[in-house]
């Protein structure tokens, strides 16, 4: 899961965050048209991010930057509990 996440990039507005009732209430965040599963993440990203926030994630890194009012307010390295893929 982490490897696939690292190879993804996105930049846009958080449309919604929700617990998917069709998939065991797994936590998901929708950025533009992309839905990101974050149910295994323990970084606090899901609890922090709000609809209307802007987020940026580049290919090859695990870091997500969260922007509010045009300022970067927080950065998260999503942690899916996979030691073998954990960032240095």
Image: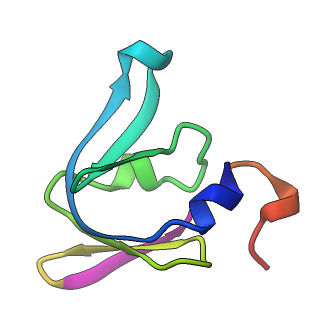
Q: Position of residue 29 (x, y in %)?
A: 34, 45
- Magenta span includes 18: no
Q: Is residue 71 above or below residue 40?
A: below
Q: Is residue 79 above or below residue 1?
A: below
Q: Position of residue 61 (x, y in %)?
A: 60, 77
Q: Quadrant of residue 72?
A: bottom left
Q: Quadrant of residue 22?
A: top left
Q: Position of residue 37 (x, y in %)?
A: 48, 42
Q: Residue at x 62, y 40 (%)?
A: 40
Q: Residue at x 50, y 15 (%)?
A: 24
> Quick check: 63 left or right of 57?
right
Classified by dominant secondary structure, the portion drawn in magenta counts as strand
Q: How many marks?
A: 0
Q: Residue at x 54, y 37 (%)?
A: 39
Q: Is residue 52 above or below residue 37?
A: below
Q: Colour mode?
A: rainbow
Residue 88 seen in render: yes
Q: Residue at x 24, y 51 (%)?
A: 33
Residues in magenta, as a range: 71-79
Asked whether 52 or 10 is in front, the reply is: 10
> Quick check: 58 left or right of 16?
right
Residue 79 seen in render: no
């Amino acid at each position: 899961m982490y490897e696939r996440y690292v190879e993804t990039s996105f930049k846009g507005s958080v449309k919604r965050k929700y617990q998917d009732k069709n998939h065991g209430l797994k936590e998901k965040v929708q950025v533009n048209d992309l839905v990101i599963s974050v149910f295994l993440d323990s970084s606090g990203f899901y609890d922090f991010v709000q609809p209307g926030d802007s987020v940026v994630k580049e290919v090859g890194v695990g870091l997500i930057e969260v922007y509010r009012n045009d300022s970067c307010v927080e950065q998260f390295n999503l942690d899916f509990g996979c030691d073998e893929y954990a960032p240095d």
